[in-house]
Image: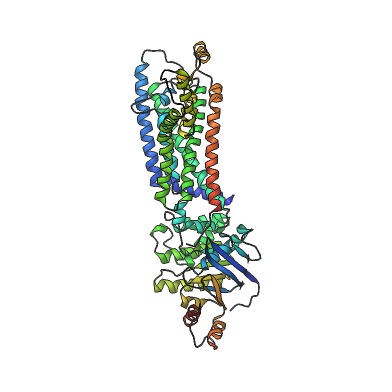
Amino acid sequence: MSNHSQIIVETQELTKVYESQTAVDHVSFQVTEGEIFGLLGPNGAGKTTILLMLLGLTEPTSGQAKVLGIDPTRDSIKVKRYIGYMPENMGFYNDLNAIQTLKFVAELNGIPREEASWRITNALTVVGLEGEEKKRVGAYSRGMRQRLGLAELLVKKPKLAFLDEPTLGLDPEATINMIELIEKLTRQEGMTVILSSHYLEMVQKLCNRIGIMIKGKMVAIGSMDELATEKFGVGDEEYTLEDIYMRYFREA
Amino acid sequence: MQGLKAIFKKELADHFSSYRFLILFALIWMVSLVITYMVGMSIKQELQNVAKPKFVFLLLFTAQSGLFSFVQFVAFFGPLIGLILGFDMINREKNEGTLSRLLSQPIYRDAVINGKFLAGVAIISIMMLSIVLVTSGLGLNLVGVVPGPEEIGRLIIYLIVSIVYISFWLGVAILFSILFRSVTTSALGSLAVWIFFSFFLTLGASILAKSAVPAQQADNPEVILQQIELQRSISLVSPMVLYSEATALIIDPTRRTTRNFVLVGPMEKFSQERFSGPLPLTQSTLIVMPYIITLIAISALCFAISYFVFMRQEIRSV
C-alpha cells in the first residue's frame, strides 16, 4: 500500500521503567510515511506507553525516539504540532458541545478562527455528527465520542495520528463505522497512523505492518505475510492474524 | 501563550456556567447583604441627630452585627471560596481522561496550571469586587455618607489583600488536587489544612507559649508579656492571622498597631493619646506592609510548589 520511504517515526532501544516495573523494554521500530502501523498486544504490554513517549508526555528511561526527525523529549511542542492523539479513554469536557470542543482544540493549535470554522463543519460532516453538534458531549454515546475524537484529528490535520484502541467498547455496527472512518482518514488526508488495538480483525484489515508486543518487548514486526512466513513457513493466505498472534503469545 | 489564553478562557467560562460557582456566589452575596443591612441599620440608628464621625463608611466593613463583621466573614469563610474553586482542578482532568488529551496538544505543560490558577484568581477578584461594590452601594443607601478618597483607597488595598489571601487558599486546593487523584481526598486534605490554620493553630499557639514560657507567678507582667509575644509569633504562621492583622489597620484607620493592647508600651500609649486622630493611609500601609508581603510570599510559594509537582508528574497510561 505504501510506496513512500520517508521515515516518520523511529525508535532505538526505547525503554521505560516505572519504579520496578519495565513497561517498555528496548523497543526499536520504524514507521514510514503513509503507513498504517499496528501495535498489537495484551493489556499492560506497553503499547500506550510507547505512544506517550513518542508524544513527549513521558520521558524514556533509556533509548531514543524520533518523530519526523525531532526528539519528542527535547522538543515536545514541535512534535505535538504534527501528531493527533486519540487516547484509549477519550476524555471530553462533558459540558461542552461538539462545536465548542472542536473550537477549543483549534484554539490550542493556533488555527485561525475562519479556517477553524470551516474545518469543524467539514469534520463533523465526515464523521457523521452533523445534527448532533449542539448536544452536550456528556450526552454522547461511546461511539459518538470516538467519532468526535476522529473529528478532532480532522480539525487538527496532523501528519501522524496515534489511535489508541479506537474501537474499544463499541458495538459491531459502530466498530464497522469506525474502521471505515479510519480508512477514509488515511486515504483522504494521507495521514500516517499508528494504531494500537486488541481488535485483531481491524488490525489485519487496516494495517500495512504490525508490531506484536508482549510484556514490554516487541517480539515480532512485519507485514501479515512476513509474520505468517516467520511463524508457519507459509504466507498469510493460510492464517489469520489471530493464529499468528496466539502463536507468538504462547511462545512468549 | 496561545495555550494559556485558551485554557484561561475555557476555565473562566466553565466557572461562570457551573452550579458550584453560582451557588457559592449567591451564598456569599446573601451573607454579605445581610451583614451590611444589619450593620447599616445599626449605624443609621446610632448616628441619628449626631454629627457623623470621620471614616463612618468603613464601619460598614468593620462593625460587628450578630455573629461577625464583613471583614471577619471574609477572613474566616474567604478561604472556602478558594478551596471550593480549586480542590478538583487537576485531579478531575486526570480522572475524566481530559488531561492527557489536553497535553497532547501543542501547548506547554505549565499553560494548564497557569491558566487554571489565573482563571481562579480572576473569579475570586470578580467575586470580591462585586461583593465590596454591592456592600458599598447598600451601605451608602442606608448610612447616607459618601466615602472620601482615602476610604476608597483603603477599600482598594483591602480588596487586593483579600484577593491575595483567597488566592493562597486556591493554591493550597490546587496543590492537593495535584497530589491526590481522588477528589474526595483532595477536598478533605485542603479542608483539614484550613481547619488546622484557622482553629487549631491559634489554640496550639497558646498551649505552646504556656509550656515554653511557664508562668510561675501569675502576676509577673514580664512573663505574661513574653507568653503573649510568643503566642502571637506562633499564631502568625496562620494565613488567617496574617490576613486579619494586615487588613485590620487598613480598613480601620483608628487602629495604630497590630499589637494587642497589653503589649503596647508606655511611649506608644503616650503617642496614642498625643495623636488621637486616625492614621493616614500611607502610615497604615507601612505598618502592615510586612504582613502583606508575607501573605504574597506564601501565596507565591504555595503556587510554586504546585507548579513544581505538576511539572514533574508523569502522564501514565494506567
Q: Residue at x 58, y 60 (%)?
A: A59
Q: Is residue B248 left or right of residue A32?
A: left
Q: Which of B10/B188 is in front?
A: B188
Most distant residue in the front direction: B216
Q: Quadrant of the N terminus of chain A?
A: bottom right
State how many labels appear: 0
What's the colour scheme?
A: rainbow
- Residue B31 coordinates in the image, percent (x, y): 36, 33
The relative height of residue A166 versus residue B248 in the rendered view (above or below) is below
Q: Residue at x 55, y 41 (%)?
A: B301
- Residue B215: quarter of image: top left
Q: Which of B277/B23 is in front?
A: B277
- Residue A165 coordinates in the image, percent (x, y): 47, 69
- Residue B297: quarter of image: top right
The relative height of residue B26 versus residue A34 in the rendered view (above or below) is above
- Residue A30: quarter of image: bottom right
The relative height of residue A99 versus residue A168 in the rendered view (above or below) is above
Q: Which of A78/A57 is in front?
A: A57
Q: Is residue A232 visible?
A: yes
Q: Is residue B6 visible?
A: no
The relative height of residue A177 versus residue B141 in the rendered view (above or below) is below
- Residue A233 coordinates in the image, percent (x, y): 55, 88
